[in-house]
Amino acid sequence: DAGLLTCQRRPGGLGHEQKDAAIYQQWKIDYLKYDNCYGYKVIKWRYQRMHDALNASGTHPIFFSLCEWGVGDPATWARPIGNAWRTTGDISP
């Protein structure tokens, strides 16, 4: 999670990107959905930091999905940072 807390109110990834990316490499995860819960603002640099940490952490490729629910119009800036991004909030019936 790019914020101070996860969506479940557990400690978030902000400031722990290098450590988290190294653990993800060790676990050989394939997909990381990086939310912005408790991020308070959508700030591109938070996603850029995890992108850089993932790329520096090893050779196992990790699909990096940015999730900020389209608030900061990621279609205009996310292409060089992530592999996918959300453009809207949750869909409900």
Image (cartoon, rainbow, N blue to C red):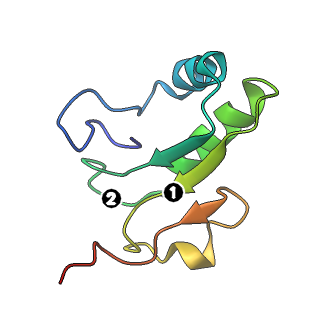
Left or right: 57, with 14 as reference point: right
The image shows residue 32 at horizontal and vertical percentages of 53, 43
The residue indicated by pointer 2 is 41
Quarter of the image that includes the C terminus: bottom left
**Residue extending furthest toward the front:** 93
The image shows residue 83 at horizontal and vertical percentages of 67, 59
| Secondary structure under the numbered disc 2 in the rendered image | loop
The quarter of the displayed image where residue 80 is located = bottom right
Residue closer to the observer: 5 or 7? 7
The residue indicated by pointer 1 is 66
The image shows residue 54 at horizontal and vertical percentages of 67, 34
Name the residue: 33% across, 32% down: 12
Left or right: 23, with 14 as reference point: right
Callout 2 environment at 10 Å: few (<14), some (14 to 19), or many (20+)?
A: few
**Does 59 sit above or below residue 31?**
above
Mark 1 and mark 2: Cα distance apart in space:
14 Å
What's the amino acid at mark 1? Leu
The quarter of the displayed image where residue 60 is located = top right
Left or right: 86, with 60 as reference point: left
Residue closer to the observer: 7 or 3? 7
Name the residue: 60% across, 31% down: 29
Q: Earlier in the sequence, mark 1 or mark 2?
A: 2
**Does 14 sit above or below residue 38?**
above
